[in-house]
Image (cartoon, rainbow, N blue to C red):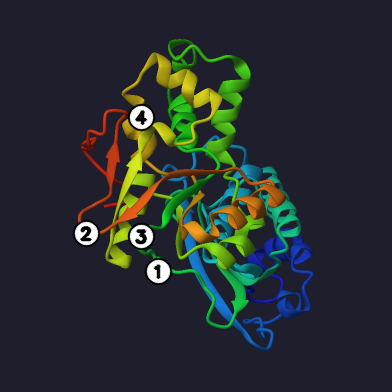
Amino acid sequence: MGDAPGSAEDRLIARYFKPLAKDPRALGLTDDCAVMTPPAGYDLVLKTDAIVGGVHFLPDDPPETIGKKALRVNLSDLAAKGAVASGFLLVLALPAGFDEAWMEAFARGLGEDAEAFGAPLLGGDTVRTPGPVMVSISIFGTVPHGTMVTRMGAKIGDLVMVTGSIGDAVLGLKLLREPQLETSWGLVPNHRNHLVTRYRLPQPRNALAEATRAHASAAMDISDGLVGDLGKLCAASGVSADISVWDLPFSAAAQSALKSHPLLSEEMLTEGDDYEIVCTVPPSKLDAFRSAASTAGVPIAEIGRIVAGNAAPRFLDRDGRSLFFIRTSFSHF
């Protein structure tokens, strides 16, 4: 991560990030590279995701939540693959004249989550940007050889399961942009706080990683919306799905907003930022999966079934009619 000895970049790294690099593989951030040897009989699982100011977080979001979110969106992918986190690399692009208090809070939040999730900082880079803050993390995980859960294993008859709740984050973002919606949606204060927190601080389901690896035939995390991401999983597996919208897990806060504005459901299902796991589970493994999820403290819901065909998944209302979505997924382009 370094620059010339004694440079401003070198001092930034020493002050904010060297204290996070406790793992011996990081070499104290004194080298250009870290070193990693996966345990015998294990595969490395690699993932990188970036978050950009004005796109994935708001400029006035608390910096500690930005650090946490950057790590958590990557941890979420590992969870869906059934992988255990091993460490990560950080690329941080900062505008000139960045605020020291912002940096201190960002590093503190990142360090807290690195400790909590067992994912140590191993190295990276710091650069200057003429644009907004950008945080890119490359994360490494491990799974027993040949057991990573891909998108390609769903089979006809498998049950479609989802963790947590769907749609909270997009509602939280709307509230931050339009605070008056709190009244329009009839929210009580704890509902507003729940939705905003779900946007700023995803809850990666790493506690369910082992159960996903043991019982799921296919899985991915929901980052771009349930409709589009389940569609990607089905396309990779060469199948389709029938989903009951009435069985989707919505939080009490989301239900309150939906009661006032039912059309919010389309954004909730297609805009993303949920960072939950959608997976397919053979019926013979459902009870074991439910038991493992309960032990892990992760709520799960059965929302549909894998069916034959190459069409996009059908999202069905209470009368069995297919819903139509103007846009099925968040996309940067």
Looking at the image, which residue is at 55% across and 24% down? 252
Residue 270 shown left or right of residue 142 in the figure: left
Q: Which residue carries the number 4 mark?
A: 265
| Residue type, numbered disc 2 | Gly
Distance of mark 2 from mark 4, alpha carbons? 26 Å
Disc 4 marks a residue whose amino acid type is Ser
**Pointer 1: residues within 10 angstroms few (<14), some, or many (20+)?**
many
In this rendered view, identify the residue nearer to me: 214 or 145.
214
Q: Quadrant of the N terminus?
A: bottom right
Amino acid carrying mark 3 in the image:
Leu
Q: Position of residue 210 (x, y in %)?
A: 63, 64
Rendered residue at 32%/66% (across/down): 237
Q: Are marks 1 and 2 in contact (CB under 8 Å)?
A: no
323 relative to 16, above or below: above
Q: Earlier in the sequence, mark 4 or mark 3?
A: 3
Residue 281 is left or right of residue 295, and the answer is left
| Residue that carries the numbered disc 1 in the rendered image | 153
Q: Are marks 3 and 1 in contact (CB under 8 Å)?
A: no
Q: Earlier in the sequence, mark 2 or mark 4?
A: 4
**Crowding at label 4, few (<14), some or many (≥20) Cα neighbours within 10 Å?**
some
10 Å neighbourhood of mark 2: few (<14), some, or many (≥20)? Answer: some
How far from the left and from the top, in percent, is residue 159? 43, 53
Residue underneath mark 3: 233
N-terminal label among 1 and 2: 1
Residue 133 versus residue 291: which sits nearer the camera?
Answer: 291
Q: Are marks 2 and 4 in contact (CB under 8 Å)?
A: no
Name of the residue lying farthest toward the front: 284
The residue beneath circle 2 is 309
* Location of residue 11 (image quadrant): bottom right
**Residue 302 in view of the camera:** yes
For mark 3, does the 10 Å Cα neighbourhood hold few (<14), some (14 to 19), or many (20 or more) residues?
many
Q: CA distance from mark 3 to mark 1?
A: 9 Å
